[in-house]
Amino acid sequence: MIYYSPRPVIGVFEKYAFGIATMLASWTDIALAEVGAQFGFPEVQHGITPYGAVPTMLNVVNQKALMELLLTGRRITADEAVRLGLITRAVPADQLAAELDKVLAALSRGSPAAISKTKQFVRRCETLTYQQGIEAATDRAILG
């Protein structure tokens, strides 16, 4: 529901976001976190294989970074999560609510139909080759 929702999904992360919470960050369209927040997948340290994290995380971070996170259970800071592409941006904790308000205001200025179609097209292109994506975009531009 989160990943394929036709409406934008915004995640706000404070303090700690481990395991499924890190996976939730990967599913959101826009992810905000406080600077001190930590992310990671500690499952292997508890004898659990984090199957659910793999498909979406492969679309979010590069494979080397993903392998390290999944195999070691290493915790990363919000700043590193931004660099890896897991979250959109990190802001000081006292500015998190204001940053969310800015994002909501920006979204409210957009056309709901165009936003929904954009999100759906991005999700569709994830399953296409580059060439197929260009062809799909060209078809959509011509057909309207």
Image (cartoon, helix red, strand yellow):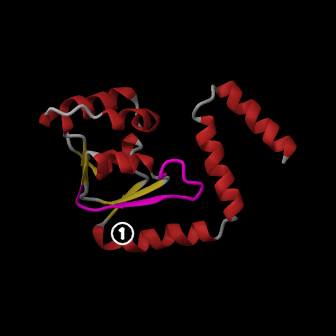
Left or right for 130, reference 81: right
Residue 91 in magenta stretch: no
SS label for mark 1: helix
* Other residues around mark 1 within 10 Å, as few (<14) / some (14–19) / many (≥20): some
Q: Relative to 63, does residue 60 appear above or below in the rendering?
A: below
Q: Relative to 59, does residue 22 appear above or below in the rendering?
A: below
Q: Relative to 137, does residue 16 appear above or below in the rendering?
A: below
User: Which residue is drawn at the image coordinates 40% and 37% (left, top)?
Assistant: 57
Instruction: Residue lying at the far right in this picture: please name it.
Output: 142
Tell which of 92 and 23 is nearer to you.
23
Q: Position of residue 86 (x, y in %)?
A: 39, 45
Q: Position of residue 128 (x, y in %)?
A: 63, 29
Left or right for 112, reference 71: right
Residue type for callout 1: Leu
The part of the image, by quadrant, that contains residue 125 is: top right
Q: Position of residue 138 (x, y in %)?
A: 79, 36
Q: Does the image show residue 73? A: no
User: Which residue is drawn at the image coordinates 66% and 65% (left, top)?
Assistant: 110
- In the image, the segment drawn in magenta is 1-16
The part of the image, by quadrant, that contains residue 73 is: top left
Q: Main secondary structure of the magenta part?
A: loop
The residue where tag 1 is placed is 96
Instruction: Residue lying at the far front in this picture: please name it.
Output: 1
Instruction: Residue lying at the far left in this picture: please name it.
Output: 46
User: Which residue is drawn at the image coordinates 38% and 50% (left, top)?
Assistant: 25
Q: Does the image show residue 123? A: yes
User: Which residue is drawn at the image coordinates 70% and 65% (left, top)?
Assistant: 111
Residue 8 in magenta stretch: yes
